[in-house]
Amino acid sequence: MVLVFIFTTALSLMPLSLRINGLQSVDITEYMPSLERTMTADFLAAYQDFNWDQVANQGQSSQEDDKVRQAFVKDETQAETLLKEGSGLAASQDQVFIKEGDQPIFVQDLGQDNPLLKSQDPQMVLKDLSQLWFKDNRLSLIVIQLLNVAIILFTNNLIFIGVVSALVYLMHLSRRFTIGSYKEALTIVLNAFGGASLLAMIAAFAGLDPLAMISLQGFAFIASLMASYWKTHFNDDYLEDIQKRGAHRGRN
């Protein structure tokens, strides 16, 4: 049963992994939200007008409060000193240094097409930074997203199958159903879920988006579960047998 569960989860993960692998960009503010407060139009204007020959040995801070800091620095050493605590943003002529909480300082090389020198629109700069950041960290970002999706799928499927199996097992309280054990109910649910997952995987590979894939999987699972019960528990011969057994128990 464990292998069947892993197999059904893998079926759902396969098309999603291909979509994640096809990512072309991410929003850097989802990973470093303090950038929305530090990457401002005022900071960009000050950066473009800044006289880099006058940067002090300890760095020059342009704005500071209890939570975030903005600074212009000569190099990474000055950035590490200024951004030692809290969140903040520091910039040199060719690099950006981003500190998010207790995380290590992130260093982004700006390259020849320095976006900070070309725009005073924070949203455009964040978009350019997101592209640069994604390009330099694509593999790790994809691996992280794959792990997150795998954990979510595994947990959701585990809870879903466990709860549905319990509900199916409770049907043994009715004389119309003969569920001998929770294991039997789990087997029925896993079989139905496996077929639904296979159908959803094929549809996803054919171009169905993830939300539609999950919806199709749910409807196919319900249909498969009802079909298996219709075949075994709702045909005339089965109901007649149940009635005979009920009458026999009544006489005893």
Image (tube, rainbow, N blue to C red):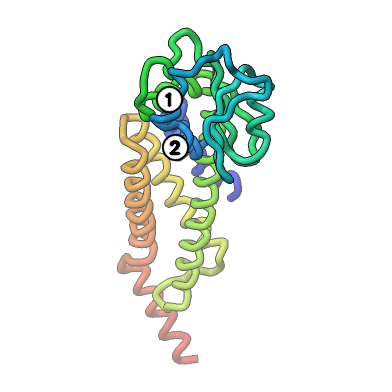
- Rendered image: mark on residue 210: none
Q: Write down the quadrant of residue 12 in the picture.
A: top left
Rendered view: 49 above or below 98:
above
Residue for point 47% across, 50% down: 191
Q: Work out which residue is located at the far front of the displayed protein and give it.
A: 54
Depth check: 145 or 89 in front? 89
Q: Are marks 1 and 2 in contact (CB under 8 Å)?
A: no
Is residue 151 visible to us here? yes
Q: Write down the quadrant of residue 85 in the picture.
A: top right
Depth check: 116 or 148 in front? 116
Depth check: 213 or 112 in front? 112
Return the x and y of residue 7 as percentages of the image width and height: 53, 41
User: Tag 2: Cα neighbours inside 10 Å, few (<14), some, or many (≥20)?
Assistant: some
Q: Work out which residue is located at the far top of the displayed protein and give it.
A: 112
Q: Is residue 25 left or right of residue 137?
A: left
Task: From the image, tell me which residue sits under label 1.
Answer: 44
Q: Name the residue type under label 1.
A: Leu
Return the x and y of residue 136 as percentages of the image width and height: 54, 19
Return the x and y of residue 123 as percentages of the image width and height: 36, 29
Q: How many marks?
A: 2
**Alpha carbon distance from label 1 to label 2:** 13 Å
Task: From the image, tell me which residue sits under label 2.
Answer: 36
Rendered view: 33 above or below 191:
above
Residue for point 37% across, 45% down: 214
